[in-house]
Every structure is written in structure tokens, then in C-alpha cells.
Amino acid sequence: MYNFKSQRVIEISTAYVDKSDYEVYSIDELFLDLKSFKYIDIYEYCLKIKNEIDEQEKIPVSIGVAPTKTLCKVANRIVKQFPEKFNGIYILDIPEKIEKALKWLKIDDVWGIGRRLAVKMHDNGVHKAWDLLQKPEMWVRKIMGIHGIRMVNELKGIRQLELDAPSPKKSIAVTRSFMEMLTKKEDVRERVETFGMYCSERLRKQNTCCKMVTVFVQTNRFRKDLPEYRNAATRILPNPTNSSILIGRVVNELFEDIFKEGFHYKKAGVIVNDFVPEDQRLINLFEEDTQNLHLPVMKAMDAMNRKYGKDKVRLGSMSGENTFGRKQMSPEYEAFLKNNTLKEANFRFH
């Protein structure tokens, strides 16, 4: 639910800027670049964003506006500290405001100052963010390196940190702990093959193919009254792929290699890595390549699942039964998951 709400807030907020002028920093925080909005009232514009989020999602947000990302974090902290005074929005737009804010802000609360570094700061008489700006550049460089110089410039209002574009993941892992320990081979197999399909979907989402697949299974290490077992197997693929069918076959073969009867399995997972772009695959001439044959089917399956909901179209080996997560859900939450088709959400309903 939190993930879903986060995506809705991001969707509303980013509609107010160009496609490349934002950065999702975390599940509950993002940066919007408003430098091109020179002829509008920034406060009123941010108030419009805040009100739309409140009206549509009933979620209060705080907005800090400043020339740099670090100062935006400072402004946002001020809003959270004094929500009623600033109506959820605060703008650090003139030197006098910036100086007052930095003299108020503890050095421990500056973005990028960790616990250990904060101790060094205090030992050297730096207790407020403003104190750091009074230190010579050589001292800052000696204590904090180039990172410190950038931080000081950011606090001065000199932009050093640009928006980060999201980069494709270098590895994808789908692992789950089961609600109940599984002893039957086919039950564990179905879960593992399902995890393989989820990995394949994520590969296609970022337009990459993997060259390596790993499968693991393990028992509950906290149950000392039961025999313990864990194992994993990895295979390098002759041809990179993101086909759920091909990855499913490999996952099944690896599962056969590591599964042992007589154990109570609590957790399993599939990991894929060693990625290449989907359109830059190097084919092994001595191995059959069926990736391109499967791709239209995979794309169609992804499109239908986006339109009608998660796992509405799935491989025959997937049972669709919920064997991990909560045993019981409220009717409202269950209905929410069933009806969710938001493409960015990471959860699923079975």
C-alpha cells in the first residue's frame, strides 16, 4: 500500500515538470527541477502540487525549494519542523534566508554528514551548518575530501549535484520466505519457477537480457528441531535471454540439481545477472537461439498483465496460489491488490 501511494505521489508531482527534470531519491522523496520556470510564482506552483496530492491521495507532503539539492533538504527539514508556520512549503531563495537556516541547522542534520563525520565536526568546533562554511577550503578538503568541497558549495547555493537518471539494475533477485514450510517437491518447484518468471519480467522492463541464472533453496535456520539444508546452483547461458519460457526451463533444471527430499523448506529464490542490452545480444552460433521467437509472446503477456492486473496471464507452471506473505488480509486491502494495475508497483496479488 505504501509503495502504491508513493507511486501515485510521484506520478502527480512529475506531471508538473518535463520528463527528464525529476529524480526519485527514495520511496518517499523526490527532486523536481524548476529552474526553467522563470516567469511563474514558484510558491503558488508548489502549493498547487501539494493541494492536488492532498485532494487525490489524502497524503500531506512537505516541499522545500532552493537553488541546490542540499539546500532543498535544508528547506524541507524546516517545513517538517514548523509545518503550521509555513503551510508545508518553504523557499530558500535569498542569501539572508540561507544564512539564517544554516545557523539554525545542526551539522549532524546536513545531508551527507554521517555519524562518524559529525563527531569529527564537533571535535573541531563545527556544530551548525554555518560553522562549516567558515572553515578554510584546505581544512574541508583534508577532513572530507572533494565530497566536502561539493557540500560546502551546495550549502552556499552553488549547484554541484545534478539530477540522477535511473540506471538499469546490474542484478535482479526475487526471493521469498514461505508462509508455511513446504515439504512437497512440486510445491517448492512451482514457487521457484514463479520467481524465475518475475525475474524475466523485470529484465524485459529494463530492456536487458541475462547471461547467468542462480537458484537457491533453504530450510528454516531457526528451527533447531528440524534438519537444516541449503544449496544453490548457477548456470551460464549460451545465449542471453529475458524469455520467461527459457529462464523457466533453466530454473527448473537447476532446481532438480539442488532439491533434496526430507526437508522442510522455508525460503527460495532466483537471481539473474550479467546483463546485456536486449538489442546487443551476441549469439552463440553453435546453440539454438529462440529468444527472438519468444519475444513477441513475452511482450504481449506483459502488455496484458499491465492492462488487466498482475499475473492474469502466466505460465502453466504457475499455480497462482499465495504461498508467501500474509496469511490473512483485510477485505479492503485484498480488493486494493486485486484491482491494482500500477506498472511501477513491486508487490503482487495471487
Image (cartoon, rainbow, N blue to C red):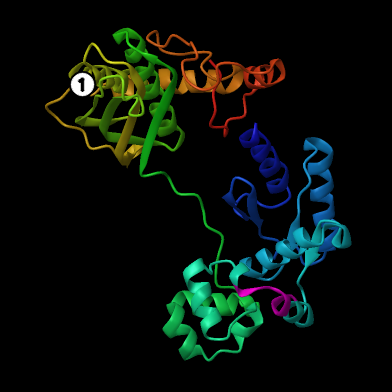
Q: Specify few, some or many for label 1: CA neighbours under 10 Å numbering under 14, 14-19, or 20 or more.
A: some
Specify whether residue 104 is painted magenta. Answer: yes
Q: Which residue is drawn at 29% across and 20% down?
A: 246
Place of residue 200 in the rendered image (x, y in percent of width and height, measured from the top left)? 38, 27
| Quadrant assignment, res 340 | top right
Q: Residue at x 28, y 27 (%)?
A: 216
Q: Mark 1 points at which residue?
A: 258
Place of residue 311 in the rendered image (x, y in percent of width and height, measured from the top left)? 51, 17
Q: Give the range drawn in magenta.
A: 101-107
Q: In this view, does 248 lie to the left or right of 107?
A: left
Number of labels in the image equals 1
Q: Quadrant of the N terminus?
A: top right
Label 1 SS: helix
Q: Is the magenta stretch mostly helix, strand or loop?
A: helix
Question: Looking at the picture, does residue 348 appear above or below residue 208?
Answer: above
Q: Which residue is drawn at 81% across and 59% down?
A: 89
Question: Looking at the picture, does residue 161 appear above or below residue 314?
Answer: below
Q: Residue furthest front?
A: 225
Q: Which residue lies furthest to the left in this view?
A: 286
Q: Is residue 48 left or right of residue 131?
A: right
Specify whether residue 144 is painted magenta. Answer: no
Q: Is residue 58 left or right of residue 102?
A: right
Place of residue 109 in the rendered image (x, y in percent of width and height, measured from the top left)? 62, 67
| Quadrant assignment, res 242 | top left
Q: From the viewer's side, name the closer residue of 298 and 345.
A: 345
Question: Looking at the picture, does residue 67 appear above or below residue 207?
Answer: below
Q: From the viewer's side, name the closer residue of 244 and 325.
A: 325
| Quadrant assignment, res 337 | top right
Question: Looking at the picture, does residue 83 appear above or below residue 74?
Answer: above
For badge 1, the amino acid type reads Ile
Q: Is residue 311 left or right of residue 174?
A: right
Q: Residue at x 33, y 34 (%)?
A: 209
